[in-house]
Image (cartoon, rainbow, N blue to C red):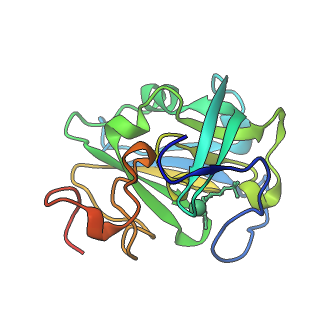
Amino acid sequence: MPPGQAVRTRHRPLYYGPVPAFRPGRWDFRVMGATEDLGSYRWTWEEFADLSRTDTVSDFHCVMRFSVPDVVWSGVRAVDLVAAAPPDPEVTHVMAWGEYGYSANLRLDDFLAEDVVLATHRGGVPLAPENGHPLRLVVPHLYGWKSVKWLRAVEYMTADRRGFWEERGYHNRAEAWREQRFSHQEEPGQGPPL
Ligand SMILES: Nc1nc2c(c(=O)[nH]1)N[C@H]1C(S)=C(S)[C@@H](COP(=O)(O)O)O[C@H]1N2
Ligand SMILES: [Mo]
């Protein structure tokens, strides 16, 4: 376990604000911002289901000091998404966007880590509404708030910008093994000015 974390196998789902309703006919997923061809990409729910899928197993670390070991996630690996929607070579960061404007910024290399997945299933069953149904991001090596539930878009960025919690006192990078919990721990240059 990373420092300061205790194992918990069950916990109450954690999120800010209401659980959004899923309407398959109105749902889409977008990749936008600094794409290689300057266009944006859009998948309907049916189209998204045709992307190549992978199972991953990882531990999940919440900044509230608990970790859930060995979670099985299934979905589209971030590397496969990025291959399907190539970024401009200048892209250094991404913003993951959830419903209602929740967001989390990530370094591109963190997003491309091999166990990062845009998950539709956890433990072999579709995500429950409160766990992010129909789609959530999972970034195992960063604290849980970076794992955006009800994911609707990924924005490619050529400079860093803070997301929802990163603007409100949480660490810009959030690596669990380095215990990067709060923005006051950031070293100069670890994040855009607050
Ligand atoms: N859209 C959205 N995603 C979110 C959150 C949120 O408030 N809104 N909370 C985050 C936090 S703090 C954690 S620890 C995890 C919890 O995921 P779980 O409830 O599925 O275990 O979701 C993350 N993703
Ligand atoms: Mo969390």
In the depicted structure, whether residue 90 falls above or below residue 84: below
Question: Which residue is drawn at the image coordinates 21% and 64% (left, top)?
Answer: 192
Using the rendered view, name the quadrant where residue 65 is placed: bottom right
Using the rendered view, name the quadrant where residue 72 is placed: top right
Q: Nearer the viewer, residue 53 or 113?
A: 113
- Disc tally is 0
Residue most extreme to the right? 125
In x, y percent, where is residue 28? Answer: 64, 51
Q: Which of 34 and 148 is in front in this view?
A: 148
In x, y percent, where is residue 15? Answer: 66, 68
Question: Which residue is drawn at the image coordinates 61% and 31% (left, top)?
Answer: 76
- Quadrant in which the C terminus appears: bottom left
126 vs 84, left or right, is: right
40 vs 139, left or right, is: left
In the depicted structure, whether residue 143 falls above or below residue 138: below
In x, y percent, where is residue 86? Answer: 37, 31
In x, y percent, where is residue 85? Answer: 43, 33
- Quadrant in which the N terminus appears: top right
Q: In which quarter of the image is ligand 1?
A: bottom right
154 vs 149, left or right, is: left
Question: Which residue is drawn at the image coordinates 78% and 63% (left, top)?
Answer: 12
In the depicted structure, whether residue 144 falls above or below residue 45: below
Question: Which residue is drawn at the image coordinates 74% and 55% (left, top)?
Answer: 131
Residue most extreme to the left? 188
